């Protein structure tokens, strides 16, 4: 094998090991003059009643060598585990072509076509009865031959007695319900928040209305995601709801990061204005969120093996890491300011109390970011394909805990500890601090 082909295969092996994103919409791929030995197309988790529908049209090979065996060109399904074995066999030259391996499930090859392929089409339905997570790949073992074709692939499981088609991968088929459930929780949270704002209307700040907007956007985002996933489940395509989903994701992303920055700066709690450097953080985070959302759309729409998938995935991860780091700065500045203030003015205990709150907030933001990024990714990689929904549940629970903590700690209060002014309350704060000193962070 040529070096580039080996690098390509190795890269494929790695991405198969780490990204288990079965999108499982009906997918259309146009392949033009492609001489890659292996072309990955899609991934899907099958139940014992799985089906793969493949429609290949406008097939042409160039140059059309006479005498070459077209049964070495075709589609196959392969689990990740068997792929590692096949890869090893190819490396050791035990087999010349992937399609010779016993470890892969051959779906269709071009051997049945006669010469003069031009414009030919093949349609087939393949029954997959061994439940597992499979990748659909195309192999072309003819050296120097370029393939062009249009491929429509639809993978689904048949459900229940009526054999209804379910286009969501085995571990994701409950996701519409999961998202719907969480959206109800957030609508309830929004209701509770409105009630709190009404009860404590004399001590409400602008930031509290902003928090309400963030919760409502989160609820709408989840509702659209539920509807989007349920539409894909029924029809295999995502028309209409995906656009709404992206719009709300975008608004939710921007407002959530803005909220973390605003709370971190103490805006409207501690001071009615933003400093220049704090505004700069917002000016970095908001445009980056726009880029992150564009990247997310491209990633979702192009599928795990689309042309630019990997580039956009990297862009997304990079932008996300920058945003996550940037939102921590205002909190750190606030902590620093409070610490200095505690030394200089008379209200030391009150300042220290605020300080404790901001330290807690800092740690909670880090935990939230860590959990929804790193732990989520780890869970998604290690859980079996059948339980992929559990990582979504874990990540949504962590997100909910974060929203609940933020709401609880920064709720409007008559006896707002951040605004205590008289000596009595200063004493009370000092008392409370003595206790907390023993558990100092
Ligand atoms: C694809 O092939 C299957 C199996 O032959 C067939 O039932 C289906 O109608 C075809 N779909 C299209 C869009 O051609
Ligand atoms: C696939 O299953 C259907 C029934 O569910 C059956 O009619 C068809 O013959 C099977 N196809 C193959 C290739 O086994």
Image (cartoon, rainbow, N blue to C red):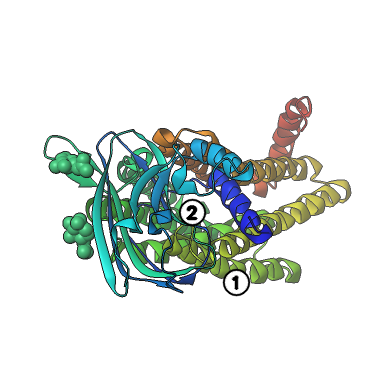
Quadrant, the N terminus: bottom right
Report the side of 322 relative to 137 (left or right). right
Residue 306, position as x, y percentages in the image? 48, 63
Label disc, if present, on residue 84 of the rendered structure: none
Report, in whole angstroms, how far the alpha carbon at label 2 lies from the one at label 1. 35 Å
Q: How many other residues sit within 10 Å of disc 1, few (<14), some (14-19) or many (≥20)?
A: some
Label disc, if present, on residue 202 of the rendered structure: 2
Question: For the residue labelled by badge 1, is the local secondary structure a helix, a strand or a loop?
Answer: helix
Marks 2 and 1, the one that precedes in the sequence? 2
Q: How many other residues sit within 10 Å of disc 2, few (<14), some (14-19) or many (≥20)?
A: few
Residue 202, position as x, y percentages in the image? 49, 54
Q: Which residue is labeled 1 in the image?
A: 287
- Vertical arrangement, residue 331 with respect to residue 30, above or below: above
Q: Residue at horizontal 48%, vertical 38%?
A: 391
Q: Residue at horizontal 53%, vertical 41%?
A: 86
Name the front one of labels 2 and 1.
1
Task: Classify the position of ligand 1 by quadrant: top left, top right, bottom left or bottom right.
Answer: bottom left
- Vertical arrangement, residue 107 with respect to residue 171, above or below: below
Residue 302, position as x, y percentages in the image? 45, 64
Residue 353, position as x, y percentages in the image? 72, 40
* Viewer-nearest residue: 4 or 110: 110
Quadrant, the C terminus: top right
- Decide if residue 405 is in sight here: no
- Vertical arrangement, residue 68 with respect to residue 50, above or below: below
* Viewer-nearest residue: 261 or 407: 261
* Mark 1 Cβ and ligand 1 under 8 Å apart: no
Q: Residue furthest left?
A: 162
Q: Residue furthest right?
A: 344
Question: For the residue labelled by badge 2, is the local secondary structure a helix, a strand or a loop?
Answer: helix
């Amino acid at each position: 094998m040529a070096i580039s082909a080996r690098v390509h295969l190795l890269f494929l092996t790695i991405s198969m090991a780490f990204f288990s994103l079965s999108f499982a919409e009906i997918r259309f791929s146009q392949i033009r003059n492609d001489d890659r030995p292996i072309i990955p197309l899609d991934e899907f988790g099958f139940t014992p009643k799985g089906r793969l529908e493949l429609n290949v049209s406008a097939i042409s090979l160039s140059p059309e060598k006479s005498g070459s065996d077209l049964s070495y060109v075709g589609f196959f399904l392969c689990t990740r585990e068997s792929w590692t074995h096949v890869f090893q066999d190819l490396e050791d030259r035990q087999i010349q072509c992937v399609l010779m391996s016993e470890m892969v499930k051959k779906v269709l090859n071009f051997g049945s076509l006669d010469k003069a392929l031009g414009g030919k089409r093949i349609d087939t339905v393949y029954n997959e009865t061994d439940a597992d997570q499979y990748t659909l790949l195309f192999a072309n073992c003819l050296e120097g031959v370029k393939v062009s074709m249009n491929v429509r692939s639809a993978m689904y499981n048949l459900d229940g007695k009526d054999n209804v088609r379910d286009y969501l991968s085995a571990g994701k088929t409950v996701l519409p319900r999961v998202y719907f459930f969480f959206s109800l929780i957030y609508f309830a949270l929004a209701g509770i928040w409105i009630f709190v704002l009404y009860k404590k209307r004399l001590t409400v700040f602008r930031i509290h209305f902003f928090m309400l907007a963030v919760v409502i956007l989160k609820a709408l985002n989840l509702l659209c995601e539920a509807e989007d996933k349920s539409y894909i489940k029924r029809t295999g395509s995502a028309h209409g709801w995906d656009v709404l989903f992206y719009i709300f994701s975008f608004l939710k992303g921007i407002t959530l990061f803005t909220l973390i920055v605003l709370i971190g700066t103490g805006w409207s709690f501690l001071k009615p204005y933003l400093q220049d450097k704090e505004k700069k953080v917002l000016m970095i985070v908001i445009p980056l969120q726009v880029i992150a959302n564009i990247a997310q759309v491209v990633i979702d729409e192009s599928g795990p093996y689309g042309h630019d998938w990997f580039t956009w995935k990297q862009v997304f991860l990079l932008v996300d890491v920058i945003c996550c780091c940037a939102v921590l700065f205002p909190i750190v500045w606030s902590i620093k300011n409070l610490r200095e203030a505690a030394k200089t003015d008379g209200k030391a205990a009150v300042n220290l109390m605020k300080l404790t709150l901001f330290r807690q907030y800092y740690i909670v933001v880090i935990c939230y970011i860590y959990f929804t990024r790193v732990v989520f990714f780890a869970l998604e990689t290690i859980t079996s394909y059948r339980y992929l929904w559990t990582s979504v549940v874990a990540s949504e629970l962590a997100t909910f805990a974060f929203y609940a903590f933020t709401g609880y700690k920064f709720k409007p209060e008559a006896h707002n500890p951040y605004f205590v002014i008289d000596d009595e309350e200063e004493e009370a704060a000092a008392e409370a601090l003595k206790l907390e000193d023993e558990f100092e962070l």
